[in-house]
Structure formats: structure tokens, C-alpha cells
């Protein structure tokens, strides 16, 4: 028989869907080297649990009400929490991946990953390595080559997505339509597209803006 591990890897599951938390707990508890020490429905609850119980690896949903996954990682870092985070999500847009890794996530996986993949990810991250599947890593590399939009460019892009003209945007922001045009041209160049319509489509596809923004 294989020897038992020297110490179990302590895992916290954070997801706003109860069925996901139950399912992940059930799956991971079948692994001799892993121990699920708790689950939380959001970032605030997760941080409170980590203050009370030692956690090695956090399986963290990306989009949750209240404190989302990226904000939770940022708060973990600012409070000196030593647990390492793996994003486990249904979302794989370029901006989701880039934002999570930039915030400090050690791993990024989709929820349809197999149990074997999850265990590999947990063990790698526990060993202070990164775990990002090849196809996600390729998209991350592409995103890192593209410059970020400035806060003003992002604001204008959202207004373009709502169908506003350069003149209307300028009036709303208190700037000239010529200045708006320059910002739109910068957006088009950064996103490597041909026009403002393609800029909006690409921005939605890549997760830079959301339709409900």
C-alpha cells in the first residue's frame, strides 16, 4: 500500500453556487493527499475563514457577488495571507485570465477540468509552481503583448459601445470631439482592429468590457 502523505494539502473552496461547492468537496475528498477544510460563498466569507483556519490552496471562483475573485486575491496579499489561489471559473476571456494572473493567482482552470487536472493543479500550486493549461497560457501570452487601455480610453470605449458619437461623448466628458477621436484611434490601434465597430466587438469578446457595463 502507498504510504500516506506527510501532511494533507488544506483546501478552501470559494464559489457562490452551493451545488458547485458541494460537488467540488465531494470530488476532492476522495483524494488521500487532500483535505477540504471549508467552503465559502464569497470573498468576504473566505477571508474570515482563512483568519480562523490554516489554508494552503484556495479554489476561487472569478465572478461572485460582492468581492470577486481578483479582489479576494488582492485582499489576501494585502493581509499577508500565505494561501495560494487557483481561479476555477467558467470564464476564459483574455482579460479574465490576465487580470487574475496579474493579481497573483498561481493557477487558472475552467470548471469543466477533470479531477486529475484539478489534483495536478493543486499539487503544483502547493509546491509554489504555476499551473496554467497550455491553451490558456497561449492566450495569456498574447494578452501580455497588448498594451492596456487607459482609464479614459476604457470609459470612452464603453460609451462607443452604447452607440454614442464622438460629439456626444465629448459633451458628456467635457472634452472636444477631436480629443475623443484621438482616444478612439488609440483604442483601435491597441486592440489591433480596423474601426470602432470592430473595437467594440473585440472588446466584448476579450472581456475588456461587458454588455451590461
Image: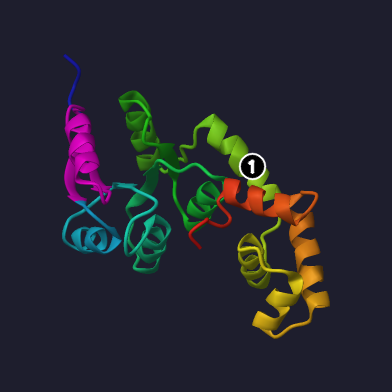
Q: Position of residue 207 (x, y in %)?
A: 55, 51
Q: Is residue 108 left or right of residue 178?
A: left
Q: Say which quadrant the N terminus sits in.
A: top left
Was residue 209 drawn as part of the magenta stretch in this picture? no
181 vs 19, nearest the viewer? 181
Q: Quadrant of residue 174?
A: bottom right
Q: On screen, 54 above or below 1?
A: below
How packed mark 1 is, by other alpha carbons closer than 10 Å (few <14, some 14-19, many 20 or more), is few
- Which residue does the image show at 67% across and 60% down from the upper left? 148
Find the residue positioned furthest to the bottom. 174
- Which residue does the image show at 64% across and 42% down from the upper left? 141
Dot 1 corresponds to which residue? 141
145 vs 161, nearest the viewer? 161
- Which residue does the image show at 33% across and 56% down from the upper left? 64
Q: On screen, 66 above or below 135?
A: below
Residue 34 seen in this snapshot: no
Magenta highlight range: 10-39
Q: Is residue 95 left or right of residue 34?
A: right
Helix, strand or loop at mark 1:
helix
Amino acid at each position: 500500500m502507498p504510504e500516506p502523505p506527510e501532511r494533507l494539502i488544506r483546501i478552501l473552496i470559494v464559489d457562490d453556487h452551493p451545488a458547485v461547492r458541494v460537488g467540488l468537496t465531494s470530488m476532492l475528498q476522495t483524494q488521500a493527499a487532500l483535505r477540504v477544510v471549508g467552503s465559502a460563498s464569497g470573498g468576504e466569507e473566505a477571508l474570515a475563514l482563512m483568519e480562523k483556519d490554516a489554508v494552503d490552496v484556495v479554489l476561487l471562483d472569478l465572478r461572485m457577488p460582492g468581492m470577486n475573485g481578483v479582489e479576494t486575491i488582492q485582499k489576501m496579499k494585502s493581509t499577508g495571507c500565505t494561501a495560494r489561489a487557483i481561479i476555477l471559473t467558467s470564464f476564459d476571456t483574455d482579460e479574465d485570465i490576465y487580470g487574475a494572473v496579474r493579481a497573483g493567482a498561481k493557477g487558472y482552470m475552467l470548471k469543466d477540468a477533470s479531477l486529475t487536472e484539478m489534483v495536478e493543479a493543486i499539487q503544483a500550486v502547493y509546491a509554489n509552481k504555476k499551473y496554467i493549461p497550455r491553451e490558456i497560457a497561449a492566450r495569456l501570452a498574447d494578452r501580455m503583448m497588448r498594451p492596456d487601455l487607459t482609464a479614459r480610453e476604457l470609459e470612452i470605449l464603453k460609451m462607443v459601445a452604447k452607440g454614442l458619437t464622438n460629439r456626444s461623448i465629448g459633451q458628456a466628458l467635457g472634452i472636444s470631439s477631436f480629443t475623443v477621436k484621438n482616444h478612439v484611434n488609440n483604442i483601435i490601434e491597441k486592440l489591433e482592429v480596423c474601426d470602432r465597430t470592430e473595437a467594440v466587438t473585440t472588446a466584448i469578446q476579450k472581456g475588456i468590457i461587458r454588455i451590461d457595463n
